[in-house]
Image (cartoon, grey):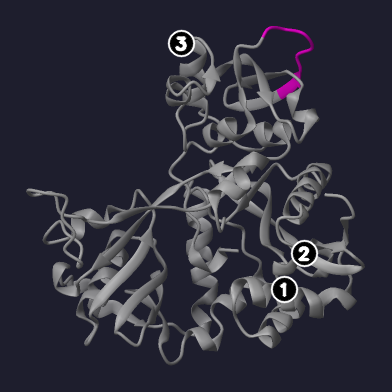
């Protein structure tokens, strides 16, 4: 990494940043440049650049946001747009940027960080680990029931926005884990006119009041791609699915759905539209897909930011190995009293639970059970401590709606 300088971006860097992003991720350079100016989620102060040979050769962004876990918001740094000029790849630029960002996020008291990887292997050396598996469905409309509640679905009106925000917020409070906090400006962007015209549509379920909404896009091949679907009531859930089932000229419905969405039970026949078969009667229903990766950044902040089961008691000494953040390696006494957490240094007390930061990050968000981690040789703890930690860290499967992907 000789000769690499990492610094804060300035407004004069934005043209170069736009060029690097458009080369790496595609898209019109002018549109990328405009997004850097008007994106309500971040600005140039959240971007770093890497310099080498007196030119900007890399860039990365940390979007400050909150992920909801156990019904509460947890401060998160969303890492996005990590790219290196193709002429300078394999010269340590990517590593230099990541080794700068992680301590910076710790200093800024982010509890956790998440990212959508181009390649999981790029980020595992930095303590990130898969945090969720989602179910990718491809459904023929005639494989869905025609629910009569579809009659109550109508086009979205801008006056509906406060109700949509309330539905989304209600899901956060009811422990629909993995959702991100949305600002008013971000909501305005998500329901802008371009998402309601042409092949893009937003509809709501309205029977004596809006109780659900669906945002989708119709492709040139007449495939309906679900971008976001939320239902506050059972009737709204049936109505929105019934609406999709009865839309004319739709060849298929594709949806990367939460793992706990009961879509399977809607299907008339348990099979996807492509007819994949694993032999005998084993038809494909959906494809399991990896989603985002997560990393604990500030161990004590992460442990005390979320809720734990009511009436849960006890404490354990944690020893977490984190080569990039030595502060996380200090042994901690993690105590829960009636579901309320606290941490304090444990000095030289022997560890009850010992693991690495990537494994503990997966346990923390409920993706990996402690007993499974121990079976895989990634965690050291006795049976009682494994059971205690497993009960503490239970959550619903994490899911992030596509409007919030970064």
Write down the residue under mark 2: 58
In which quarter of the view is residue 53 placed? bottom right
Q: Name the residue rendered at 78%, 47% in the picture.
A: 105
For disc 1, the neighbor class at 10 Å (few under 14, some 14 to 19, many from 20) is many
For residue 226, above or below residue 174:
below
Write down the residue under mark 3: 383
The residue closer to the viewer here, 336 or 6, is 6
For residue 133, above or below residue 404:
above
Q: Is residue 72 visible?
A: no
Element assignment for label 3? helix
- CA distance for labels 1 and 3: 50 Å
Disc nearest the viewer among 1 and 3: 1
Residue 193: assigned label: none
Element assignment for label 2? strand
- Give the image location of residue 70, x and y in percent: 53, 41
Q: Which of pointers 2 and 3 lies earlier in the amino acid sequence?
A: 2
- CA distance for labels 2 and 3: 47 Å
The residue closer to the viewer here, 6 or 398, is 6
For disc 3, the neighbor class at 10 Å (few under 14, some 14 to 19, many from 20) is few
The answer to whether the residues at label 1 and label 2 have Cβ atoms under 8 Å apart is yes
- CA distance for labels 1 and 2: 7 Å
**Left or right: 143 as drawn, with respect to 40:** left
Q: Name the residue rendered at 47%, 63% in the picture.
A: 167
In which quarter of the view is residue 93 placed? bottom right
Q: Which of pointers 1 and 2 lies earlier in the amino acid sequence?
A: 1
Q: Which of pointers 1 and 3 lies earlier in the amino acid sequence?
A: 1
For residue 117, above or below residue 316:
below
Q: Residue furthest left?
A: 280
Write down the residue under mark 1: 20
Element assignment for label 1? helix
Q: Is residue 161 magenta?
A: no
- The magenta region covers 343-350
């Amino acid at each position: 990494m000789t000769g690499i300088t990492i610094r804060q971006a300035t407004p004069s860097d934005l043209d170069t940043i736009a060029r690097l992003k458009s080369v790496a991720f595609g898209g019109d350079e002018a549109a990328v440049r405009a997004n850097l100016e008007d994106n309500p989620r971040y600005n140039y102060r959240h971007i770093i650049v890497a310099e080498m040979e007196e030119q900007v050769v890399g860039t990365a962004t940390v979007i400050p946001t909150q992920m909801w876990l156990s019904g509460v918001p947890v401060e998160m740094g969303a890492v996005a747009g990590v790219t290196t000029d193709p002429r300078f790849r394999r010269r340590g630029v990517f590593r230099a940027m990541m080794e700068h960002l992680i301590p910076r996020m710790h200093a800024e008291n982010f509890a956790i960080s998440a990212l959508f990887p181009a390649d999981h292997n790029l980020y595992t050396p930095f303590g990130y680990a898969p945090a969720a598996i989602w179910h990718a469905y491809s459904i023929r409309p005639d494989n869905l029931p025609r629910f009569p509640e579809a009659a109550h679905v109508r086009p979205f009106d801008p006056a509906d926005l406060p109700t949509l925000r309330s539905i989304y917020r209600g899901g956060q409070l009811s422990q629909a884990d993995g959702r991100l906090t949305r600002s008013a400006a971000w909501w305005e962007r998500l329901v802008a006119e371009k998402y309601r015209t042409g092949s893009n549509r937003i509809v709501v379920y309205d029977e004596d009041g809006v109780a659900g909404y669906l945002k989708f896009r119709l492709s040139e091949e007449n495939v309906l791609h679900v971008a976001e679907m939320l239902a506050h009531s059972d009737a709204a859930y049936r109505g929105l699915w019934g609406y999709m089932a009865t839309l004319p000229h739709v060849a298929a419905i594709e949806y990367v759905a939460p793992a706990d969405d009961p879509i399977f039970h809607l299907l008339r026949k348990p099979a996807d539209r492509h007819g994949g078969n694993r032999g005998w009667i084993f038809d494909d229903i959906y494809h399991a897909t990896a989603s985002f990766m997560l990393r604990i950044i500030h161990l004590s902040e992460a442990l005390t930011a979320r809720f734990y089961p009511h009436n849960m008691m006890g404490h354990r000494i944690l020893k977490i190995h984190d080569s990039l953040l030595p502060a996380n390696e200090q042994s901690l006494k993690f105590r829960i009293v009636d579901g309320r957490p606290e941490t304090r240094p444990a000095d030289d007390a022997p560890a009850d639970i010992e693991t690495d930061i990537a494994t503990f990050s997966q346990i923390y968000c409920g993706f990996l059970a402690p007993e499974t981690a121990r079976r895989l040789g990634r965690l050291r703890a006795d049976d009682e401590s494994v059971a205690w930690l497993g009960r503490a860290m239970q959550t619903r499967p994490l899911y992030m709606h596509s409007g919030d992907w970064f």
